[in-house]
Image (tube, rainbow, N blue to C red):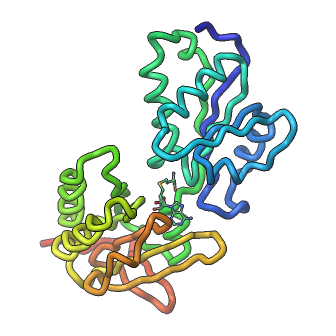
Amino acid sequence: MSNTGNGWVVIAGLGPGSDALVTQEVRDVIDEATDIVGYIPYVKRIAPREGLTLHASDNRVEVDRATHALEMAAEGKRVVVVSSGDPGVFAMASAVFEALEDGAEANPGWLDLEIRVLPGITAMLAAAAAIGAPLGHDFAAINLSDNLKPWSLIEKRLQLVGEAGLAMAFYNPRSKSRPHQFARALEILREACGADTLITFARDVTKPGQELLTVPLRDALPEMADMRTLVIVGNRDTRRIGNYVYTPRYARDEA
Ligand code: SAH
């Protein structure tokens, strides 16, 4: 299909929940859009208006959704693909580039489309800020869902990252379809990081009903996390001061 010009795709992050955390450039681009594409709860956050078509789809159809966005842009539409948090963190930006790569041969015009990624505040940063500064030193961000990678690889990464002494932020920690894996993750972490290491469960961050809970790994229970929770495991220097949890900027020499 050739490109009829003027269409574009913007992949935009809506932040963790609070409207105050949507950036001005994301608001502006939504005002210019003809079409919004995304997972149902994120599309619900967009105010309907004349001239704007909302295309809400179910979870797990990311590449179909991305392909649809590229097709509409090639027809001249101004398409905003919405993600929660940041669109580049376990979200739609990569899905759009996967769809572009898959479809570029059949649709060479797609390569000339204007595609832009607008960042948003990712859940990990909002959660860290809510509790203090647990990510103040080196850290790794890990998606605990095994939809797109084998669970064995997740276990290996938890082990190695824990041994390396990095703090960790976990997305998609525990779902109903895989209730036992998070318990296993906690076991690996207790072993690799030490049972005194602090773990924070941050649920519905920046939304009404936000909950924050910090315990040592030895007291962590799988039920403390669900899919609305962002989990942060500190490093061995992560500590409490007053009501806050923070990680100092320095690290001790291991020797
Ligand atoms: N692109 C998103 C992440 C999508 S993965 C971002 O950058 O934030 C979805 C996971 O993000 C959820 O399972 C949860 O672990 C986390 N998450 C998203 N919003 C959250 C919020 N407001 N509070 C706590 N965790 C959240």
**Quadrant holding the C terminus:** bottom left
Q: Is residue 3 above or below residue 39?
A: above
Q: Residue at x 51, y 89 (%)?
A: 243
Q: Position of residue 197 (x, y in %)?
A: 28, 80
Relative vertical location of residue 246 with respect to residue 49 in this rendering, above or below: below
Return the residue found at the far right.
Answer: 50
Find residue 38 and report its horizontal and vertical position in percent: 60, 42
Q: Position of residue 232 (x, y in %)?
A: 39, 70
- State which quarter of the image contains the N terminus: top right
Extreme top residue here?
2
Does 190 sit left or right of 60 as displayed?
left
> Is residue 197 depicted above or below 148 in this figure?
below
Q: Depth check: give the residue in front, 229 or 157.
A: 229
The residue positioned 53% from the left and 16% from the top of the image is 111
Q: Residue at x 72, y 62 (%)?
A: 20
Q: Residue at x 27, y 77 (%)?
A: 236
Furthest-left residue in this view:
255
Left or right placement of residue 46 versus residue 94 in this view? right
In the displayed structure image, the side of residue 107 where residue 144 appears, left or right: left
How many discs mark residues in the rendered view? Answer: 0
Q: Splitting the image into 4 quarters, where does residue 187 fall?
A: bottom left
